[in-house]
Image: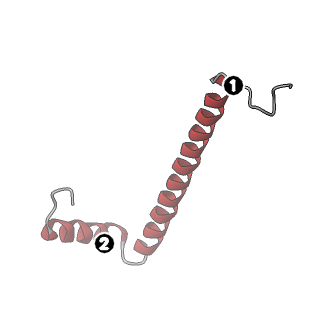
Amino acid sequence: MFGLGPWELLLIFLAILLLFGAKRLPEIAQGMGKGIREFRKAMKDTTEEIKGSLENEGGKSEDKKPSDSDRKG
């Protein structure tokens, strides 16, 4: 994971623990979780919107051939 070994991760965790304290860590983790969730939702919505507009634009630009039901006898 990013080229970090277990000792480096432990050192980073201890530094964060010292900076923010044990009481504040759950709040920080919860805030990060909410932020990541909102970011993923926004990405999903944007992707769906782009796909939808591409599909709508693709249908408009194609030359539609008349079907048998559209032809008069």
Taking the spot 44% from the left edge, 67% from the top edge, the residue there is 28
At 69% from the left edge and 25% from the top edge, which residue is drawn?
65
User: Relative to residue 27, is residue 69 depicted above or below?
Assistant: above
Decide if residue 61 is on the left or right side of residue 32.
right
Q: Residues within 10 Å of mark 2 (few under 14, many from 20)?
A: some
Q: Position of residue 26 (x, y in %)?
A: 44, 74
Q: Nearer the viewer, mark 2 or mark 1?
A: 1
Circle 2 — which element?
Answer: helix
Specify whether 12 is left or right of 69: left
Q: Position of residue 30 (x, y in %)?
A: 48, 69
Task: Give how far apart the Cα atoms at labels 2 and 1 are.
Answer: 67 Å
Q: In this view, which residue lies farthest toward the bottom?
A: 23
Query: Of 5 and 13, which appears nearest the observer?
Result: 5
10 Å crowding of disc 1: few (<14), some (14-19), many (20+): few
Residue at the image position 74 percent from the left and 31 percent from the top: 67
Side (left or right) of 69 relative to 28: right
Q: Which residue is mark 2?
A: 17
Residue type marked 1: Lys
Q: Quadrant of residue 68?
A: top right
Locate the C terminus and report the quarter of the image it occupies: top right
- Pick whichever, 37 or 7, lies toward us: 37
Three-letter code, disc 2: Leu
Q: Which residue is tagged 1?
A: 65
Which label was assigned to residue 28? none
Q: Quadrant of residue 1?
A: bottom left
